[in-house]
Image (cartoon, rainbow, N blue to C red):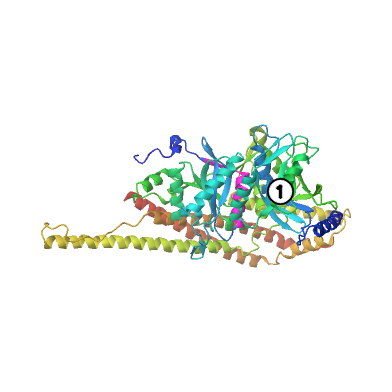
Amino acid sequence: MAWQTGTSPALFKTRNRVTEVHIDGLALLKLVKHCRDSLPQMVAGSLLGLDEGKTLEITHCFPVPAPRAEVDEYEGQPEGVSPIEGGDMEGEEYQMEMMKMLREVNVDNNCVGWYKSIYFGSFCQTTLVETQFSYQENLSENSVVVLYDPVQSLRSTTTIKAYRLSDEFVDAYRAKSTGFVPPSDVLIELPLKIRNPGLITAFLYDVKQEGLLKAGPRYSDRLDNPAAPLERYLEHMCSWVDELLDENTKFQYYLRSIDRQGKDAQRWGSKRDDDDPTAQSWKNTTPPTRLDSLLIANQINEYANHIQLHSKASLSKLYLTTSLTKAAAPAGPSAATSSVPPE
Amino acid sequence: MAEEEEVVVPAAAAATTESAAVEEPPAAATTVKVHPLVVFSILDHFIRRQEGQERVIGTLLGSRDEATVEVQNAFAVPHSEKEGEVAVGQATNKTMSGLLARVNASEKIVGWYATTPPTPARPINDSTSLIHDFYLQECEEPVHLVVDTSMADGIRLRAFAAPRTGADASRAFVEVSCSLVFADFERDLLETMTSGIVNDPLETGSSLSVLPSRMNAVETSVEHLLGLLDDVSEYCEDVASNKKKVHPEAARHIADALATLPHLDATDVDAAFNANMQDIVMVSYLASVTKTQLAIAAKIHATF
């Protein structure tokens, strides 16, 4: 481990890995508000908190503004490189300034990771991995990235997850090796829980007591028909499979070029005796990075899981409605007549 | 509330005739709407106060629509109070609002908050007006939000405005109506926080809640639906037994809800069920195949 130059003090507590993430209600609300408010743009921010034993506590967060006039459209996926990922100076200055301000009012002045809004479940991108890698290398091994999916949360339950890179992958990535890491082991999901201090819990109970949380009927599917998310998942999955194919082609091209060069070398070697080694410079062949295909595989897997979960939920809904309609069908007319008079 | 405004207008008019200022100052706020995020932020700030500090203050950000102020965000400002002297972190206030404006420019300074001073009977004291004077320079007609952290009667919110009252343009604090408003996501998250609690908050001093999973969501919404059905049938029975009067709007809604159930015979239901079922099973099969493929690929890669 020659790279341990002692620049990062966090490395002292290396063996103390966190296994769970607790996010404060306040931080969560701020994070979600930021991501919601800036739709359709995807945004990012910083997380502040402490790691204590096996849990990482996120107690505060603040948004980091997007660098001016830089919107990157990638085939309909609004996923401009966020300021944190871009490594841009302005964003860094902003973060320092903000942390200085927050320290004055006793907010935990310790950056424990970052958050990012993602679009419809696709998050396995090279930039994300690179940024997370630099966080884990430079800041603390316990840094996490919290991903919030505003689009998905809009239509069903709140989708928010905490991830970090696996040790295995970090080692491989640091060594710049093209070795294989199982795709599902690149990013590790950590269980996320919401924590609220006593005073805020008291406020929550107050609010609940007053019945303010009971909304009127909400139709989560009012925007489009229920089949839409499934279609969207499949679409995304198809495009990711295409990308995996692209990566495959790249790899095959690489293999072929190696093969051709090997033959060239043989021919060249048999023509002349090996007295003139500098005569021909070989075309530089760099192996394609494996990271992309690993990430894509992981992403596809993620979508497959989404689809299965979704179909499970749809199946149960389907059975429910069918049994309801069947139960209602024979009793239908009489029930209708009995309920009309009171009106 | 309307009376308040009537008092304000002539006073303001008098002030403008004196000073050459042309633009008419906006009327003081009469309604304050507060988002729960703001309350969270204030309470968090209070929890993190300096030792010995009796109350905390900060700036409220939001939007103003005529006499209604909606408070969407807040940040803490350091301050100190000693025997009638008040120091407010003006620099912090300026930098912080500048920093936040870069992320969300639509949120402007609309006022300031404080937690209750040691004598909860008097949410307004001498230093309040001093700090309010400071915020008068930051925005027009700031509102003042007081959060009761003494826990005497739960956590109560009170809002004040200080409209000009006399011809000499002096100001006096007036309590205005104050209510919580929720954005959809806030309601969802708060609901999650309260219903997902897994520990005993009284024991640990803080609550810990889990996020609902996808499958739980179906369960909870069915439970919600059952609850609503109970409410409706109770209402119907009350009406039928003449305990309650018919509310035309409610009746209309019930009729609409009943009408959404399509009249289908059993064979149609079966056909639709089967078609839908086949689709879902097909897709889920495809997903499984994809997963298997990926697993095989991973195995092959790992072995060679």
Split into 4 quadrants, where in the image is the C terminus of chain A? Answer: bottom right
Q: Residue furthest right?
A: B242
Crowding at dot 1, Cα within 10 Å, few <14 / some 14-19 / many 20+, comes out as many
Q: Which chain carries label 1?
A: B
Q: Where is residue A211 in the image (x, y as percent from the top left)?
A: 75, 48
Left of B85 or right of it: where is A229?
left
Q: Tell me if residue A53 comes above or below residue B166 in the rendering.
A: above
Say what secondary structure mark 1 lies in: helix
- Can the viewer see residue A153 in this picture? no
Q: What residue type is labelled 1?
A: Tyr
Q: Magenta region: which residues?
A: A20-37
The residue nearer to you, when weighing B145 against A18, is B145
- Residue A31 within the segment the image draws in magenta: yes
Q: Mark 1 points at which residue?
A: B135
Q: Where is residue B189 in the image (x, y as percent from the top left)?
A: 64, 49
Left of A312 or right of it: where is A301?
left
Split into 4 quadrants, where in the image is the N terminus of chain A? Answer: top left
